Image (cartoon, rainbow, N blue to C red):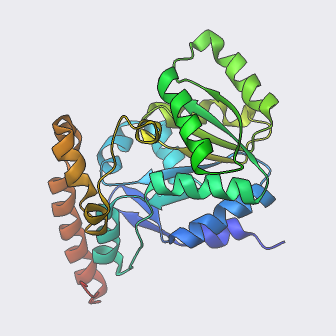
Amino acid sequence: MENKTDTFNSKRLSILNIWVDDVNRCQARSRVQWMLECSDRAQVIFASNPEKNFSLPKYKDLYHLYQNADLLLPDGIGMVLAARLIHGRHLERVPGVEFFFDICKLAVETNRSIFIYGSREEVNERASRVLSKKIQGLDIAGRSNGYVKENEMEGLVNNINQSGAQILFIALGSPKQERWYATYRSRLKHVRVCQCIGGTLDTLAGNVKRAPDIWCRMNLEWLYRLIKEPKRIKRQRVLPIFAFMVLLEAIRYRIHTRVDFPMT
């Protein structure tokens, strides 16, 4: 059988200190289908965004894990623009929260079940109910809130394995969710797709509202969330720095290669 993993990873782009996959939403979905059908281990999906450029290098173990992830979604508009400026590649933004639904729909189509781990109990429970109504036929084989103690983790892993779920969603926030995957991935017997989804359950449960469609179409979802949650400024203050660094890298790349990439 052709080694699709190597073919896929050849499309990975370096953006400053992190990476993103040159993949559109349809290609990413096909990749997940391949994971479900052909993989013999739990493969992981991370969102790639500008904030990761500053947070991940602080953790050597997670940095290596991220670099070798099975799928790095171009989640933020910053990564899309950076790929265009540095590499001349026109990426399509693939928001992790939207791709979460794509995977759930694929689970129904391929008769796979899911397990949802993370967030507070009331949020996890409500999000699971809402998800079942949104996607008819979805088999939620199990769920657990994110407040599992270390001495209870053995039981959680056993529950995931006993559920038979081939898809696992981890909503613990970064870097806790990535660290959990790194620790327990080898012990997941049936899971073939693992997506770290951050605060997606809060959005699904209605605790956090997504930006209206017009904001999303204008790629200003980040600004809408900042207006609604001013405390996010602590995380988003790195965005101007990221933009400046990308411009410098794009200039250096053009000088080195003497290639002009289109800006639009």
Q: From this viewpoint, which residue is outermost toward the top? A: 151
For the C terminus, the image quarter is bottom left
For the N terminus, the image quarter is bottom right
The answer to whether residue 189 is left or right of residue 78 is: right
| Residue 68 visible, this angle | no
Q: Residue at x 30, y 74 (%)?
A: 86
Q: Residue at x 27, y 65 (%)?
A: 214
Res 187 → quadrant: top right
Res 94 → quadrant: bottom left
| Residue 220 visible, this angle | yes
The answer to whether residue 76 is left or right of residue 1 is: left
Q: Residue at x 54, y 51 (%)?
A: 100
Res 14 → quadrant: bottom left
User: Relative to the observer, which residue lies in front, 192 or 10?
Assistant: 192
Q: Please state the horizontal and vertical placement of residue 84, each as a whole percent of the image.
A: 32, 76
The answer to whether residue 61 is left or right of residue 228 is: right
Q: Please state the horizontal and vertical placement of residue 4, each as a whole percent of the image.
A: 71, 70
User: Relative to the observer, which residue lies in front, 98 or 50?
Assistant: 98
As drawn, 112 above or below 55: below
As drawn, 4 above or below 160: below
As drawn, 165 above or below 214: above
Q: Please state the horizontal and vertical placement of residue 175, each as a whole percent of the image.
A: 43, 34
